[in-house]
Amino acid sequence: MAKFPGSRILSQAKNKVLNYSTLAKAEKPVGSQNGLGNVILHPSLQRRIAHLARATSNTKAHQAPFRNMLFYGPPGTGKTMVAREIARKSV
């Protein structure tokens, strides 16, 4: 029998965290190849960010009017980091 009523739930949560961390280590860290640091991104998301950076760079090169981008989502999801990376790559 468990030491206290929530111990079974805690052990299940611990096992899930361990499983997720093992899966995360198996992923290839795409972000280490660019300015995103050690951020692990899905390859399709990485391509989309690179595409936005190229589009912004081409806009600057041709002195065309800029299109706006709106990043939305809860705090801590990387919106500012992605905006900075796009700005860095588009210079």
Image (cartoon, grey):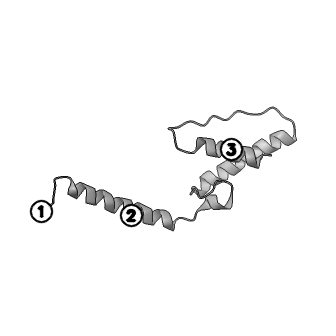
In percent of width and height, residue 80 lies at 62, 41
What distance separates the C-alpha of mark 2 from that of mark 3? Answer: 32 Å
Quarter of the picture containing the N terminus is bottom left
- Counting labels gives 3
Q: Secondary structure at mark 1?
A: loop
- Which amino acid is tagged 1? Met
Visible residue check, residue 52:
no
- Residue matched to label 2: 19
- Which amino acid is tagged 3? Arg
Find residue 17 and report its image quarter: bottom left
> What residue is rendered at 69% in x and 48% in y?
85
- Residue matched to label 3: 84
Visible residue check, residue 77:
yes
- Residue matched to label 1: 1
In percent of width and height, residue 25 lies at 49, 66
Residue furthest out toward the right = 62
Q: Secondary structure at mark 2?
A: helix
What distance separates the C-alpha of mark 1 from that of mark 3? Answer: 52 Å
> What residue is rendered at 48% in x and 62% in y?
24
Q: Identify the mark nearer the N-term, 2 or 3.
A: 2
Q: Identify the mark nearer the N-term, 1 or 2.
A: 1
In percent of width and height, residue 90 lies at 77, 46
| 3 and 36: which is toward the camera | 3
Placement of 39 over or under 23, stated as above or below: above
Find residue 31 and report its image quarter: bottom right
> What residue is rendered at 81% in x and 32% in y?
65
What distance separates the C-alpha of mark 1 from that of mark 2? Answer: 25 Å
- 50 sits to left or right of 8: right
- Which amino acid is tagged 2? Asn
| 49 and 78: which is toward the camera | 78
Q: Nearer the viewer, mark 1 or mark 2?
A: 1
- 18 sits to left or right of 12: right
